Amino acid sequence: MKKPLFIIAVVLMGYAAQAQGKFDRETRTAEIKKIQAMEMAFITKELNLTPDEAQKFWPVFNQYRTELKGMAIERKHGDQLEKQQKMLDIRKKYREDFTKVMSHERANKVFGAEEEFKSLVRREFQKRQIEKKQLEPRKKGF
């Protein structure tokens, strides 16, 4: 039930964005915020977080995400294995922080839920790209 609603929301966002034409910086920022809100709802639901747990979890998760982004920027052209090891070290560190908010079992699920959300967004993006390519010949009068 939750996945179809999510997919519908993403599709509607995409069509609304296409109707507006090219993205300007403001529109892009708004779209990113919408996706982040959907991610927050998705992960909250997947981990079955109580309101109290969510209040404690999200600041830690946002800190985790910020640290990952900083590391990715810092090591953009570095050794790939070194980069992966650093990411793993960060995940291990934050898994321990997540266990302070929720059970160890659910803390382990954080990264899976994060990857599942990314996968859903990626598939939806690819689907829209295919649909866009299929519509392009029709626009040219063929």
Image: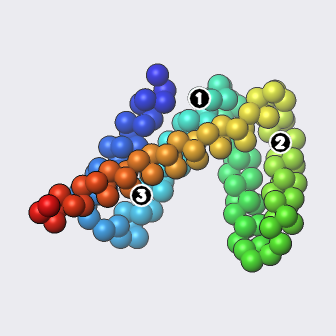
Q: Position of residue 80 (x, y in %)?
A: 80, 67
Tell me where residue 25 sits by quadrant.
bottom left
Give left or right: position of 42 versus 140. right
SS for callout 1: helix
- Can you identify the residue that label 1 sits on? 45
Circle 3 Cα neighbour tier, 10 Å, few/some/many (<14 / 14–19 / ≥20): few
Residue nearer the viewer, 21 or 103: 21
In this picture the colour scheme is: rainbow
Residue nearer the viewer, 112 or 36: 112
- Can you identify the residue that label 2 sits on? 95
The Cα–Cα distance between marks 2 and 1, rounded to whole angstroms, is 18 Å
- Can you identify the residue that label 3 sits on? 30
Circle 1 Cα neighbour tier, 10 Å, few/some/many (<14 / 14–19 / ≥20): few
Q: Residue furthest bottom?
A: 77
Inspect the image, locate mark 1, and give the three-letter code of the amino acid beneath it. Lys
Name the N-terminal-most of marks 1 and 3: 3
